[in-house]
Image (tube, rainbow, N blue to C red):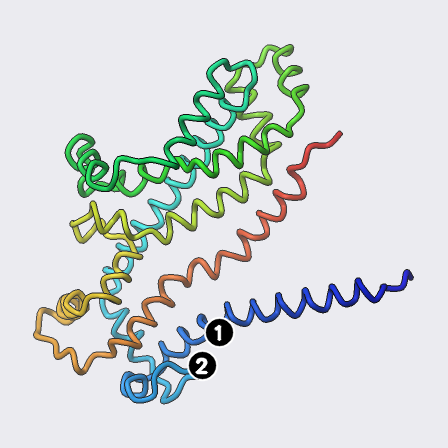
Amino acid sequence: MRKITTDRLTFNTIAYVLIGVISVLCVIPFIMVISSSFTSEQTIVASGYTLLPKDVTVEAYRVALKDPMLMLRAYSVTITVTVIGTVLSVYLMAMTAYVIHKRVFRIANGLAFFFFFTTLFNAGLVPWYILIIKYLNLKDSLLALILPSLLNVFYIIVLKAFMRGVPEELSESAYMDGANEFRIFNSILLPVCKPVLATVTLFVALHYWNDWYLAMLFISEEHLRPLQLLLYNLVTNSEELRRVMEASGGGASVDMSNLPQNSLKMAVTVIAIGPIILLYPFIQRYFVKGLTLGAVKG
């Protein structure tokens, strides 16, 4: 075996130590969230959030799941928006990148500049809000959670840069066989672009799953609220917490001083991120598979 040089050993040691420290710093807040969700409210008020749970209790989870239909509705909205939005967004951005990277398309450079220009200047929140509410009439519609995030210029540029590395011979041979642009895009280019598509899909899906801002602006109907908006309201609004508890308790008046408010926020956070943690190993497996199988072979 080849001996590891001193420089290589020093570099590996420093790299592993830095990665280890960063990993620990990322894991500690997550452990504190889980620990606090199993800690009694009195202990949190008296001692604050701790790394290990004290006075272990499941009261926060019992309160959070007292009305399971509320949580299930929020989950269903979030899953629907995430799945539909991710599929449409990745496909449209890939199609856009395919068009603007084609050298035979005369206005490709102008179109690319148009997309880039929108990242530098925009009309502002008020005109955009009026456009969504008044002209597109998307108030209290799931489309209001999907359409505004369909196109991301940064991801389009990333896709375009990757497509430039795809040999033109693939498209030319398909043209000679009589394939049209849609056939080339769907059957040849997309399979070749699996690595970058896997990366973009992961980030787009996380964006849709974690988004609460659009729902706060455009959704007022309770049955259309996504999971993250429900979590946001519980974390920031005591009245929302009171309303949820009164609804789950049959309409009786609720004494907020007896509710596990801080531990309940942590419990709802764990419930919200649970599916992502459980699904991440499977997502990572397909992500790595796309990186290894999607390369262009000579």
Closer to the camera in the image, 104 or 172: 104
25 left or right, relative to 153: right
Return the residue found at the far front. 120
**Figure quadrant of residue 119:** top left
Q: Nearer the viewer, residue 215 or 38?
A: 215
Asked whether 120 or 179 is in front, the reply is 120
In the image, what residue occupies the spot 23% across and 60% down?
Answer: 70
The image position of residue 83, as x and y in percent, is 39, 43
Q: Residue at x 61, y 12 (%)?
A: 175
Q: Could you say where residue 92 lies in the image, as x and y percent from the top left?
A: 43, 30
Q: Secondary structure at mark 1?
A: helix
> Which amino acid lies under the numbered mark 1 shown in the image of this protein?
Ile
**Residue 53 percent across, percent down from the top left:** 41, 84
Residue on which disc 2 sits: 51
x, y percent for residue 152: 41, 38
Q: CA–CA distance between discs 1 and 2?
A: 7 Å
Going by the image, does 24 lie left or right of 246?
Answer: right
Q: Relative to 47, does residue 30 appear above or below in the rendering?
A: above
**Mark 1 Cα-neighbour bin, 10 Å: few <14, some 14–19, many ≥20:** few
Q: What residue do we see at 37% from left, 78% from top?
A: 36
Residue identifier under label 1: 28
* Secondary structure found at label 2: loop
Amino acid tagged 2 = Leu
In which quarter of the view is residue 61 placed? bottom left
CB-based contact (under 8 Å), mark 1 and mark 2: yes
1 or 2: tag closer to the N-terminus: 1
- Are there few (<14), some (14-19), or many (20+) residues within 10 Å of tag 2? some
